[in-house]
Image (tube, grey):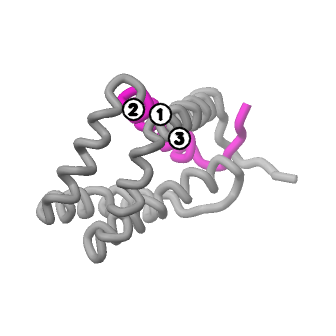
């Protein structure tokens, strides 16, 4: 069982877990969609900006609401929020390097999908089975 300080940590872990499970399933069920997404994203500055703004906004919201490093699960949730914020900022300001990484990673779609699925299951399980309250961590 996971013990954390904030109930928000548990809720965000559940939401992030579900997101990662869905992404993992999509990568396993239809890996060609990931290539299509990367191709369309690379070809469309408007889509780059729109996706960048959306990812940045989600990252900022998580960073504002949940930016504490009190326990392992809270650290993971906080890092995911900050990574989203940085990814969105890069898509807005300088998308080229991020798009190159994305195209390179398409060659490993199934690996990324399985990794997302496993991480999603772990985060979701931690969120669903964890407890929140004031504790002393050793």
Occupied quadrant, residue 128: top right
Please tell me whether residue 106 is drawn above or below residue 121 in the rendered image. Answer: below
Measure the alpha-carbon separation of dots 2 and 1. 6 Å
Q: Is residue 114 left or right of residue 109?
A: right
Q: Is residue 72 left or right of residue 65?
A: right
Residue underneath mark 1: 110
Q: Nearer the viewer, mark 2 or mark 3?
A: 2
Instruction: Work out whether residue 71 can be spotted.
Output: yes
Q: State whether the magenta stretch is mostly helix, strand or loop.
A: helix
Q: Nearer the viewer, residue 55 or 105?
A: 105
Judge the density around disc 2: few (<14), some (14-19), many (≥20) Cα neighbours within 10 Å: many
Residue underneath mark 3: 13
Occupied quadrant, residue 121: top right
Residue underneath mark 2: 27
Element marked by disc 2 = helix
Q: Position of residue 103 (x, y in %)?
A: 35, 54
Q: Position of residue 51 (x, y in %)?
A: 23, 57
Q: Are marks 2 and 1 in contact (CB under 8 Å)?
A: yes
Verify whether residue 7 appears in magenta: yes
Element marked by disc 1 = helix
Q: Position of residue 27 (x, y in %)?
A: 39, 32
């Amino acid at each position: 069982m996971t013990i954390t300080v904030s109930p928000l940590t548990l809720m965000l872990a559940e939401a992030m877990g579900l997101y990662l499970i869905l992404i993992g399933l999509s990568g396993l069920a239809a890996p060609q969609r990931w290539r299509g997404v990367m191709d369309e994203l690379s070809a469309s500055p408007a889509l780059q900006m729109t996706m960048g703004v959306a990812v940045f906004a989600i990252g900022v919201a998580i960073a504002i609401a949940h930016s504490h490093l009190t326990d392992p699960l809270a650290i993971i949730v906080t890092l995911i929020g900050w990574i989203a914020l940085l990814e969105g900022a890069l898509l807005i300001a300088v998308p080229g390097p991020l798009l190159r990484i994305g195209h390179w990673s398409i060659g490993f779609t199934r690996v990324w999908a399985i990794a997302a699925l496993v991480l999603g299951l772990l985060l979701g399980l931690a969120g669903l089975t964890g407890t929140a309250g004031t504790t002393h961590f050793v």
